[in-house]
Amino acid sequence: RMEERTRERLFERSLLVLAAVSPDAPDYRLLKARAYVNLGERPAALKALEPPRTSEERALVAFMNGNLPALERELRDMKSHAHRLLST
């Protein structure tokens, strides 16, 4: 339980940090949605990515929706390993 709360705090802090970042910054939407997903806020995560614009965003939406074929397709198109991690 302690580990879970520590993890939640890290994602809460990431949302606080993102509040000071321009929404036009690269990966802003992806990072915000990922934080919401990890806080159990799927509807907020989907709204943050509405509509998904990049392969990374489409992969995260596919992940949240349990759409494995779409997730695999989007991950195949990604060149960055870091983006692959953020999208799952």
Image: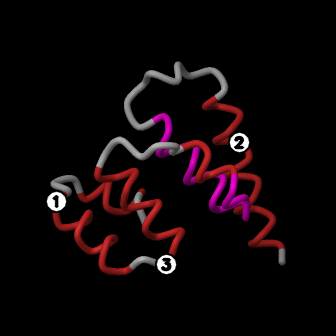
Q: Nearer the viewer, residue 62 or 19?
A: 62
- Coordinates of residue 77 in the picture (x, y in percent): 16, 59
Mark with earlier residue (2, 3): 2
Which residue is labeled 3 in the image? 66
Q: Which amino acid does label 2 sit on?
A: Arg
Dot 1: what SS? helix
Range of magenta residues = 28-43
Q: Residue at x 58, y 42 (%)?
A: 48
The residues bearing labels 1 and 3 have C-alpha atoms spaced at a distance of: 18 Å
Which residue is labeled 2 in the image? 13
The residues bearing labels 1 and 2 have C-alpha atoms spaced at a distance of: 30 Å
- Coordinates of residue 8 in the picture (x, y in percent): 75, 59
- Residue 47, placed above or below residue 88: above
- Coordinates of residue 45 in the picture (x, y in percent): 61, 52
- Residue 40, placed above or below residue 35: below
**Snapshot colouring:** secondary structure
- Residue 49, placed above or below residue 65: above
